[in-house]
């Protein structure tokens, strides 16, 4: 039995402990297991935790359920990812409300070089299906991972189009990995396991209840570089996902449609209100995301002397090539204005390359 994993899963089961509070508890106590071993008096001193939550932690009744989940994970060859694990999606790691735990069955790296989400209405039209196929075909050589929700309509078309074009694709589920909704997508899901996979934050025995879908949508929005809304009515899950993606500083794209078409109203609204870039073909995505740009051939001075503050910024990258401004703020304690000034200087000197989503790449 993986003891560390047991406590990590158990933390997500404690009544009153959500993703934000759970991460705070881990930070204060030093780990998931430490949370359950902490004294009552120490737990009560943690900001934002009440007496009921403390009592729930001390009962430790959730540990047996966590052990049950581990048995399923091991039997089904499922990969569990704690939010601090290296294999956990780094883009989602930047989101404060990202899941503490993820459960993944598949064969593609979730930290793919380029990741896009494709969402839309469940009542997809022929036009929507054609758009999904065209985009996937146009992006077939771009080393892209396609993420969607494996729902009826656009989600399913996006997954199928990705597979047809040889692109890996991951479906984010609103239930546990012991079931599949909708059941009609079983064959599609099996094919996705050959080039992609299935991902969820939910334990087994969790049904696809209505309240789970917005939570599923935030995972899609958080683990991507860009979101494409293909078709959407004036209300629906696709618009919710777009709103979340914008809040995460992800680039959002929308496929325009005819005025008056029910399932183009949402896309046209996103474009009209500057909540999304207008996208008619893959080249528009490449241009905005700067995926068609080759790094500028600026030779960094071999003996360039970094200032003390520049050194702080560069140390944040560590062994990673890409880093977010939010991470720099947390790890350097420099002001946002100061960091922006330093980043501009490093970009001009060819040390860093600015990327969408407030991220920078070390050259």
Image (spheres, rainbow, N blue to C red):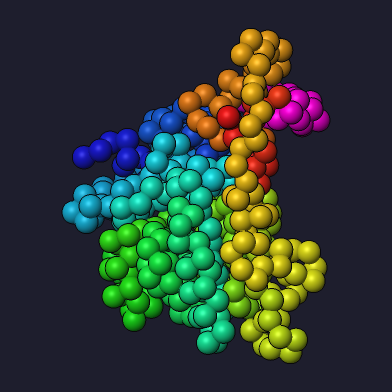
Q: Is residue 251 visible?
A: yes
Q: Bounds of the magenta span?
A: 329-348
Quadrant of res 246: bottom right
Residue 15 seen from this side: no
Asked whether, in this view, residue 130 is left or right of residue 203, the answer is: right
Q: Position of residue 58 (x, y in %)?
A: 41, 39
- Residue at (50, 30) in percent of width and height: 320
- The residue sitting at 53% across, 47% down in the picture is 92
**Is 334 inside the magenta-drawn segment?**
yes
Q: Nearer the viewer, residue 344 or 34?
A: 344
Q: Is residue 350 left or right of residue 179?
A: right
Q: Residue at x 21, y 40 (%)?
A: 1
Q: Position of residue 157 (x, y in %)?
A: 45, 76
Quarter of the image with the C terminus is top right
Residue 343, image x, y percentages? 72, 29
Q: Residue at x 43, y 31 (%)?
A: 31
Q: Nearer the viewer, residue 12 or 315?
A: 315
Q: Is residue 204 left or right of residue 95?
A: left
The residue closer to the viewer here, 75 or 303, is 303
Q: In the rendering, at what x and y percent does residue 156 appear?
A: 44, 75
Q: Main secondary structure of the magenta part?
A: helix
Taking depth in this image into account, of 204 and 231 the one nearest to the observer is 231
Is residue 256 in the magenta section? no
**Badge count:** 0
Residue 326, quarter of the rendered image = top right
């Amino acid at each position: 039995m993986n003891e560390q994993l047991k406590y990590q899963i158990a933390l997500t089961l404690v009544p009153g402990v959500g993703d934000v509070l759970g991460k705070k508890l881990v930070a204060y106590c030093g780990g998931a297991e430490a949370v359950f071993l902490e004294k009552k008096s120490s737990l009560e001193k943690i900001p934002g935790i009440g007496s009921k939550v403390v009592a729930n932690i001390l009962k430790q009744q959730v540990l047996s359920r966590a052990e049950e989940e581990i048995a399923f994970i091991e039997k089904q060859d499922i990969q569990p990812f704690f939010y601090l694990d290296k294999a956990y999606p780094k883009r989602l790691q930047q989101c404060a409300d990202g899941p503490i735990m993820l459960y993944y069955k598949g064969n593609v790296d979730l930290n793919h070089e380029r990741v896009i989400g494709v969402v839309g209405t469940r009542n997809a039209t022929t036009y929507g299906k054609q758009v999904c196929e065209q985009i996937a075909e146009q992006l077939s050589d771009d080393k892209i991972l396609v993420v969607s929700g494996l729902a009826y309509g656009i989600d399913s078309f996006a997954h199928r189009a990705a597979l047809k074009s040889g692109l890996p694709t991951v479906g984010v589920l609103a239930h546990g990995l012991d079931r599949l909704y909708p059941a009609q997508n079983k064959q599609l899901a099996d094919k996705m396991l050959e080039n992609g996979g299935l991902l969820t934050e939910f334990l087994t025995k969790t049904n696809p209840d209505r309240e789970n879908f917005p939570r599923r949508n935030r995972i899609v929005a958080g683990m991507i570089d860009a979101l494409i809304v293909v078709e959407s009515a004036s209300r629906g899950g696709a618009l919710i996902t777009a709103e979340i993606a914008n809040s995460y500083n992800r680039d959002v794209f929308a496929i325009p449609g005819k005025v008056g078409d029910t399932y183009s109203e949402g896309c046209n609204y996103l474009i009209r209100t500057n909540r999304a870039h207008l996208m008619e073909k893959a080249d528009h995505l490449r241009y905005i995301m700067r995926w068609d740009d080759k790094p500028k051939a600026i030779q960094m001075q071999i003996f360039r002397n970094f200032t003390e503050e520049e050194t702080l910024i560069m140390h944040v990258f560590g062994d990673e090539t890409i880093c977010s401004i939010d991470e720099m703020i947390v790890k350097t304690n420099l002001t946002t204005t100061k960091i922006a000034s330093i980043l501009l200087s490093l970009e001009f000197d060819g040390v860093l390359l600015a990327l969408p989503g407030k991220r920078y790449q070390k050259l």
